[in-house]
Amino acid sequence: MNDVRLEVALSVGIIMAQGVRGTRDFYPEDMRLRNWLFDNFDDAALLHGFEEYDAPVLEHEELYTRKQGEEITQQLYNFLDKGDRKVALRPEMTPSLARMVMSRAGALPMPIKWYSIPQCWRYERTQRGRGREHYQWNVDIWGTNEISADAELISVLVTFFEGVGLTEEDLVIRMSSRKVLEEVLGSLGIVGDMFAQTCIIVDKMDKLPADIVSEQLSTLGIEENAIKTIQSTLGIKDMDSLRSMLGEESPAVIELTSLFSALDAYGISEWIEFDASIVRGLAYYTGPVFEAHDRAGELRAICGGGRYDKLLSTLGGKDLPATGFGFGDMVIMELLAEKGLVPELTSGNDDVVISLSPELRNAAMHVASSLRARGRSVDLVLENKRLKWAFKHAERSGAQRLVMVMPDEWKDGKVRIKDLETGEETNVDVESL
Ligand code: HAM
């Protein structure tokens, strides 16, 4: 919105009802779904022995100023705070996690298996599955370079997918290793920062026309022959072709072979496909990389991650092996909706308590309090309402019982209870509620 439109909108009160573009409000019905999704994130991570951590949404801007030209660093929500410090809203969690690990380096018993569900901010072009804020489930293992850590992460992912009812027919986890391109490009003299920049450019292959990608690669100083080699390497979709291109002794082939064998041991190979075009658009990845995509190919990546053994030295620390993934809350909800897997959730209250005469308001409060003291969640009707309204309200909110405080019953020390599942009504002693 430009300044003039903003002023007009403010003057007529429009702006107050609207949030900032690309951000979302969560009404209770949205919050129920968000909590359901997060509970499934929690469950999959906890089942695998991960522990939860958190960090502030505001960080020093320098934490994200990497020089390889990643989109993420161009999309930063950064500003000067009142003390003239350059700060930014985190666009991703990995640098904060690296900072936390670095500041306790040596004191943390390794390996660590941590997860978090932070809100992340990126000034992106808003589109289906992409907003300017999103929640991103992060699951990471630090302190081991064993391939079993990478396999364990895929097991967390598959456990989550199964938990929400998705199958390997709905989506695929495409996997490769940065080492594939590293070997090919290393032999052409493309190493270090130039290699990272090449990965960032080729990551856009499926979003940009081939000639634009080639142009960007040649701007980087990569010759035509090398560009052709890159393109043909990225076209490889099976391990046998990779083996015949790089040879059995290739570190990339050895690494991926043992990763696929581990995934076989978990019994989850049918979810995974080798695809050399997966390189990921962040500079710091060094080993296996993966992304989950819907099989129909209609949505953006569901999640993405990989090994990043060299991140700490870019932040001034001593390197530690690490691997992990980030999983946004937006694309997955699109996919679940498409597959009819979004659950219908209600408030989940146990009881609705209503007094059916104004004089019994205090009695209803007493009943609600004693039910709450017994651990039942109670929605007490706060105004004079008719019984018909109370039935509808209790049903809509998914309560188990409607507890009615009525004059005659109350005189006898009883309340009337309607079981909303069976429809059965009984009078029950207040003492034995
Ligand atoms: P990323 O690929 O930039 O990786 O993001 C990971 C996931 O976050 C994406 O696959 C998508 O689900 C979600 N996501 C990213 N941007 C948006 C957006 N604007 N709107 C909605 N969802 C979005 C990382 O951020 C790495 N730090 C992940 C990681 C953790 N690697 C190792 N550990």
Image (cartoon, helix red, strand yellow):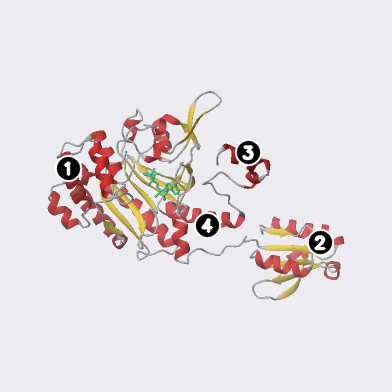
Give the class, few, some or many, for how many residues have Cα within 10 Å of label 4's Cα (few <14, many ≥20).
Answer: some
Image location of residue 272, percent across then percent down: 30, 58
Mark 1 against mark 3, which lies toward the viewer? 3
| Marker disc for residue 224 | 1
C-alpha span from label 1 to label 4: 50 Å
Residue lying farthest to the top in this orientation: 83
> Do the residues bearing badges 4 and 3 touch, measured as CB atoms within 8 Å?
no
Image location of residue 395, percent across then percent down: 67, 68
Question: Which sits earlier in the primary sequence, circle 2 or circle 3?
Answer: 3
C-alpha span from label 2 to label 4: 33 Å
Badge 4 element? helix
| Marker disc for residue 36 | 4
C-alpha span from label 2 to label 3: 44 Å
Q: Is residue 146 visible?
A: no
Residue lying farthest to the front in this orientation: 4
Badge 3 element? helix
Question: Which sits earlier in the primary sequence, circle 1 or circle 3?
Answer: 3
C-alpha span from label 1 to label 2: 79 Å
Question: Which sits earlier in the primary sequence, circle 4 or circle 3?
Answer: 3
Disc 1 marks which amino acid? Glu
Look at the numbered disc 3 and say if its residue's Cβ is closer than 8 Å to ligand 1: no
Badge 2 element? loop
| Marker disc for residue 7 | 3
Mark 2 against mark 3, which lies toward the viewer? 3
